């Protein structure tokens, strides 16, 4: 499905950085676009494109993570991290769907023939207030869920990596004790 190794190094730790950066960035852009129409006009098609790249990065990263899981020592923390990793894709899909719907709504609102249709689009070429409120609330929910899930997965991955390893704290060579 995707790379499992890059230059002989497991791909998962490298691909994780895409997800850790792109999913919160997409969430932030989505909320900004939903709250401020001028931002949405500037983003345009870039918003759903960013959400699409984020969504694609998630299964690539989880696939590489599943490969890595088969090549390291099993433990409960790693198992929990793997399970949590599988829970991010629905949030990434949600980001993509909401971003695409928001882009389409604003694009339609900007079209000359759309002004005044069914009371949903204002004369200014912006969606009406009920539609904007729904877009903001939905964007906030999906964005918050995605960011919280990225944090939880990352935290569990760090614990699986560092607590499972034999870790000896560094010795303070400057102390006279």
Image (spheres, grey):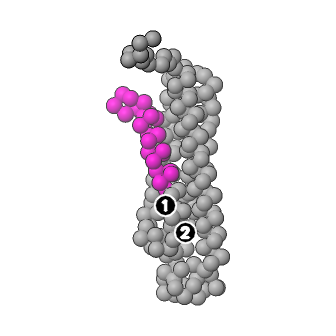
Residue at screen point 56% across, 29% down: 159
User: In the displayed structure, would residue 19 be above or below residue 162?
Assistant: below
Q: Decide: few, some or many residues near mark 1? Use Cα within 10 Å; few <14, some 14-19, many ≥20.
A: many
Q: Where's residue 95, x and y in %? A: 56, 57
Residue at screen point 38% across, 29% down: 9
Residue identifier under label 2 = 35
* Magenta highlight on residue 23: yes
Q: Which residues, given as a range, are shown in magenta?
A: 1-26
Residue at screen point 40% across, 32% down: 5
Q: Decide: few, some or many residues near mark 2? Use Cα within 10 Å; few <14, some 14-19, many ≥20.
A: some
Q: Where's residue 47, x and y in %? A: 47, 63
Which residue occupies the extreme front position in the image?
A: 176
Q: Quadrant of residue 34?
A: bottom right
* Magenta highlight on residue 149: no
Q: Is residue 44 visible?
A: no
Residue 29 is marked as: 1
User: In the displayed structure, would residue 130 be above or below residue 97?
Assistant: below
Judged from the image, the secondary structure of the residue bearing numbered disc 2 is helix
Q: Is residue 59 visible?
A: yes
Q: Where's residue 31, x and y in %? A: 54, 62
Q: Where's residue 177, x and y in %? A: 45, 11
Residue at screen point 51% across, 37% down: 63
């Amino acid at each position: 499905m995707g790379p499992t190794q890059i230059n002989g190094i497991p791909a998962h730790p490298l691909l994780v950085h895409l997800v850790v950066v792109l999913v919160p960035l997409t969430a932030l852009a989505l909320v900004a676009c939903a709250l401020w129409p001028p931002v949405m006009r500037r983003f345009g098609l870039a918003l759903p494109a960013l959400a699409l790249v984020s969504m694609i990065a998630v299964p690539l990263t989880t696939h590489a993570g599943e490969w890595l899981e088969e090549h390291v020592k099993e433990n409960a923390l790693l198992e929990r991290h793997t399970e949590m990793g599988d829970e991010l894709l629905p949030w990434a899909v949600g980001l993509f769907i909401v971003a695409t719907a928001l882009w389409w709504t604003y694009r339609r609102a900007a079209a000359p023939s759309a002004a005044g249709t069914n009371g949903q689009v204002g004369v200014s070429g912006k969606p009406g207030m009920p539609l904007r409120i729904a877009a903001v609330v939905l964007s906030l929910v999906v964005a918050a869920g995605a960011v919280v899930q990225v944090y939880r997965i990352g935290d569990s991955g760090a614990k699986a990596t560092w607590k499972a390893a034999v870790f000896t704290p560094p010795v303070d060579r400057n102390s006279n004790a």
